[in-house]
C-alpha cells in the first residue's frame, strides 16, 4: 500500500520558495532538477570511516575548468563499506546524514536484476532458487562482475513475486537509512538475451518488473531512477523521476534519453572508457549531468571529474 504523502515541510524538505537550484519540489517525494551535479561512489574507503566510507566533502575542478565544484546528489550503496563497518549489513545512515548536512541528497543503490553473493540477504535468493527448480539464478553477470548472477524476472514459478518481495524489503531499508531516492540496477535483461542472461525475458515482462520497482520506491516516499534500459526509456519515463546511465556516448545511444530531459527529468550520466574531452561538450548540449570515472569500472570517491 502506498504511504500517504506528508507536507513537504513536515519531511524537512525545502518548500518551493526555499528550494535550491538543484531541487524541484512538487510533493513529498524529492525530485531533482535537470542539470543537478552528481557523484557516483559505490565503493567506500577507511579514510572516510565516520561517513560510512563516502567522501562527502569532495570538490574537484570540472572538465570545463574554473573553481572546484561539489555534487548536489550522491548515488551510494545502501550499505556502508565492509572495510569500514566490519560487516556487510550496516545501513549507510552515517553517509546519508553527512550528505544531508552538506545540503545534498542521497540515492540508494540496489541491484534489482542480478543477485550479488556478498549481500546480507543472498542466502534467501539461493534457498528460493534451490526449492524452485533452479529457476531464479541465471548466468554470471559478466567477467568484470563474476560475483553476481542474472535474475529471472519471469513469473511462471513466482520468481518475479519473490524478487519484488525482496526488493521491497531492500527499499524499506533505504527509507530507514534516510535516503531520498533509489537506483535499481540491472533492469534491462530483455536487451541482453538468453545467451547472456540464461533467461528468455520479453520486453513486456521487463516493463512489468520495472514499473513495479518504481511503484515500490514511490510507495515509500522515495524518488526512483531508471538505470540504462534505453530501449524502453520512452515507455518508462512517466514512471521514473530521473535516469542513471552508463556509457551512452561510448555506445552512441544518448539520444534515447532525450525523453527524460524533455519531461524535465535529469539524466545522471557516467562514462568509463571515453575521454571527457570527447563527450562533455555534447553532454552540455543535451543538458545531461555527466562525469568521468575510471575505465576499470571502480567507483571510489576519486577520480571525480564532472563535465561542468
Image: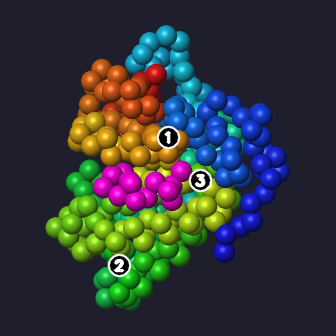
Numbered label attached to residue 231? none
The residue labelled by disc 1 is: 266
Residue 256 in view, yes or no = yes
Query: Does residue 270 lie above or below 136 as drawn?
Result: above
Q: What percent of the width, then of the height, locates residue 124?
A: 47, 77
Q: Residue at point 59% right, 41% down? A: 32
Estimate how packed mark 1 is, as few (under 14), some (14 to 19) or many (20 or more) residues with alpha carbons within 10 Å: many
For the residue pair 9 and 138, the one nearer the viewer reads as: 9
The mark tally for this picture is 3
Marks 1 and 2, how far apart at CA: 30 Å
Marks 3 and 2, how far apart at CA: 25 Å
The residue labelled by disc 2 is: 154
Q: Residue at point 82% right, 46% down? A: 9
Q: Residue at point 50% right, 20% down? A: 60
Query: Does residue 37 lie above or below 81 as drawn?
Result: above
Residues at badges 3 and 1 in contact (C-beta under 8 Å)? no
State yes or no: residue 271 in magenta.
Answer: no
Q: What percent of the width, then of the height, locates residue 4?
A: 75, 65
Residue 94, quarter of the rendered image: top right
Determine whether the residue tagged by mark 3 lies in a helix, strand or loop.
strand
Numbered label attached to residue 223? 3
The residue sitting at the right extreme is 10
Q: Is residue 87 left or right of residue 65?
A: right
Q: Which residues are magenta?
A: 228-241
Pick the quarter of the image with the N terminus.
Answer: bottom right
Q: Is residue 211 left or right of residue 135?
A: right
First in sequence: mark 3 vs mark 1: 3
Amino acid at each position: 500500500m502506498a504511504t500517504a504523502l506528508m507536507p513537504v515541510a513536515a519531511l524537512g524538505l525545502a518548500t518551493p520558495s526555499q528550494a535550491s537550484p538543484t531541487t524541484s519540489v512538487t510533493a513529498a517525494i524529492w525530485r531533482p532538477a535537470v542539470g543537478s551535479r552528481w557523484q557516483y561512489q559505490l565503493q567506500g574507503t577507511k579514510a572516510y570511516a565516520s561517513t560510512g566510507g563516502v567522501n562527502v566533502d569532495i570538490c574537484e575542478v570540472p572538465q570545463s575548468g574554473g573553481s572546484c565544484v561539489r555534487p548536489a546528489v550522491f548515488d551510494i550503496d545502501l550499505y556502508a563499506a565492509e572495510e569500514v563497518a566490519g560487516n556487510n549489513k550496516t545501513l549507510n545512515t552515517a553517509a546519508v546524514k553527512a550528505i544531508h548536512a552538506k545540503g545534498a541528497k542521497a540515492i540508494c543503490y540496489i541491484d534489482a536484476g542480478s543477485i550479488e553473493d556478498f549481500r546480507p540477504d543472498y542466502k534467501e535468493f539461493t534457498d528460493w532458487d534451490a526449492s524452485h527448480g533452479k529457476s531464479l539464478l541465471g548466468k554470471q553477470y559478466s567477467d568484470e562482475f563474476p560475483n553476481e548472477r542474472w535474475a529471472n524476472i519471469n513469473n511462471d514459478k513466482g520468481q518475479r513475486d519473490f524478487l519484488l518481495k525482496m526488493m521491497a524489503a531492500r527499499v524499506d531499508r533505504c527509507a530507514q537509512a534516510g535516503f531520498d531516492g533509489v537506483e535499481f540496477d540491472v533492469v534491462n535483461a530483455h536487451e541482453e538475451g538468453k545467451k547472456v542472461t540464461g533467461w528468455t525475458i520479453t520486453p513486456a515482462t521487463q516493463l512489468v518488473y520495472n514499473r513495479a520497482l518504481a511503484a515500490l520506491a514511490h510507495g515509500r516516499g522515495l524518488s526512483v531512477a531508471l538505470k540504462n534500459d534505453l530501449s524502453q526509456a520512452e515507455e518508462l519515463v512517466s514512471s521514473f523521476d530521473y535516469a542513471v546511465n552508463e556509457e551512452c556516448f561510448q555506445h552512441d545511444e544518448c539520444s534515447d534519453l532525450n525523453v527524460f530531459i524533455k519531461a524535465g527529468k535529469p539524466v545522471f550520466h557516467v562514462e568509463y572508457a571515453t575521454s571527457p574531452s570527447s563527450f562533455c561538450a555534447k553532454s552540455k548540449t543535451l543538458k545531461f549531468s555527466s562525469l568521468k570515472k575510471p575505465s576499470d569500472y571502480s567507483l571510489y570517491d576519486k577520480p571525480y571529474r564532472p563535465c561542468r
